[in-house]
Structures are given as structure tokens and as C-alpha cells.
Image: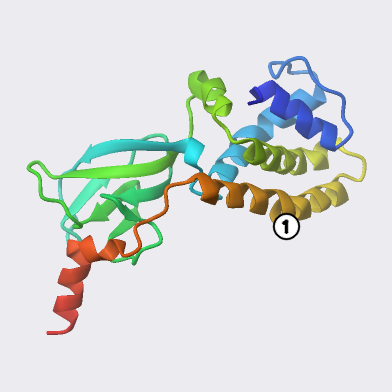
Amino acid sequence: MPTQLELVNRALGLIHQLPIASLASTTDPSAVAVTREWDGAFLEFLSEAQWFWAKKRDTLTADSPAPSFGWSYKFALPDDFVSVVGVNETYADTPSDVYELEGGYILTDDNVASEPAELNLEYIYYPSDSALETFLAAMDPKAAVAFQTLLAAKVAPALAKDGLNTANVLLQRYYTVDLPKARARNGNLNRPAPRFPYKTSTSLWQRSNFRNR
């Protein structure tokens, strides 16, 4: 898969800009624009889907004090957290009874039985600077195409002739063509959620039982 510099130069090519030799330059307008926009664009892109190549697993230990009401436990989210994929093998498209995100924590009482309380979290993560090239090496080809279109749209206002119009054209291509293709391929290669995941959700049963009393 492409390196960061290769992705950047492909994005620049979409707006008819010459490739750059390094992102470290503080005088090259293209390098400056890309450096300014990279983190925001990449974070936005990572949040667009449950990318199989950007998933990570961690076992979290409960923090004190516990939530004052509503949930039994809270767990600090990892520093590199972007979005939830699964909580104790219950997935993000299941009912909101399973968990809630709040102020850098994930709140839940779903299937937490250990002492001290632990939670198995599957999530999309943002790589550290030192791990970025390894992370990009695992990136799916269609995801790379989609991201370079988004990055080109972000830098177009500063670099391209008729920049705002160019950015709008690229964003339309991103949302209607490149991102749907990347999501479709991702769905074909990703692990599907269990058909009835909430049958194993203790919290859902408890809350439903409470409502029906």
C-alpha cells in the first residue's frame, strides 16, 4: 500500500499540483497545506466506517468512581480511540442500551462480570506518528483511493485554481463514488455482527424487564 508521501502526491495530482519531495518543508505551499490538513482529514476518514484494517482490541479496567446513575461501570477510552466497533462482542449497530460514550469514557453494565470489572473493546484507532507508515501499509486499496480524494478536497481551496469549486467537485466524488466503494469492499471483508447480538446482552434484558414491571 502507499506511503504517506505517495498518498499525498496522489492527492496533489487530483488538483493538478506537482508532487513534493518531503512533508517536512515549511516553504513549499503544497507541503504546508497538506501538513495542516492531514490529521483532521485522516481522523474524519477513519470515522467513516468500521475499517477492518484500522481495528484494534483492548481490555479495559473499570475506573472509579462509578457513574452516579444510569450505568454500573465506566472505562477510560484508549488515547488512540476513534470509534467503537464492539463491546464484549456486542456491536455498535445494536441498541443503545448496551453502552454510552461520555467525556472520554465508555459507560456500560453489559456482560461485566469480572473483579475488577473489565470490558473487551474493539475499536477504530488513530496511529501514532511512529506507527503511521505501518498503519498505512495495511490500508485497503479502495480506502486509499477514497482518502486521497478527501485529502485533495481539503487542500484544494489553498492550492487549486478555482479552489472552492474544485473542492466541491472532489467532495461529491468522495461521497457518491469513492467512499461507497471503499465501504462496500470493507463490508465484504469485515466480520459481520452476530445476527441476534442482543440476546446475550444482560443489560438489555435487565432494562427491558424493568420497563415491563
Residue 73 shows in the view? yes
Quarter of the image with the N terminus in it = top right
Q: Residue at x 52, y 27 (%)?
A: 135
Q: Residue furthest right?
A: 161
Q: Specify whether 196 is left or right of 148.
A: left
Q: Residue at x 77, y 15 (%)?
A: 21
Q: Which residue is mark 1?
A: 176
Residue 37 placement (x, y as % from top left): 67, 36
Q: Specify whether 163 is left or right of 83.
A: right
Residue 171 placement (x, y as % from top left): 75, 51
Q: Quadrant of residue 22?
A: top right
Residue 70 shows in the view? no
Q: Specify whether 122 is left or right of 64.
A: right
Label 1 sits on what residue type? Thr
Give the crowd class for mark 1: few <14, some 14-19, many >=20 residues within 10 Å.
few
Q: How many marks?
A: 1
Of 159 and 20, which appears nearest the observer? 20
Q: Quadrant of residue 4?
A: top right
Q: Residue at x 79, y 48 (%)?
A: 170
Residue 20 placement (x, y as % from top left): 79, 19
Q: Is residue 23 above or below residue 112?
A: above
Residue 83 placement (x, y as % from top left): 43, 47
Q: Residue at x 56, y 50 (%)?
A: 48
Quarter of the image with the C terminus in it = bottom left
Of 145 and 108, which appears nearest the observer? 145
Q: Residue furthest bottom?
A: 213
How is this picture coloured?
A: rainbow
Q: Specify whether 1 is left or right of 110.
A: right
Q: Is residue 22 above or below residue 15?
A: above
Q: Is label 1 in a helix, a strand or a loop?
A: helix
Of 194 and 16, which appears nearest the observer? 194
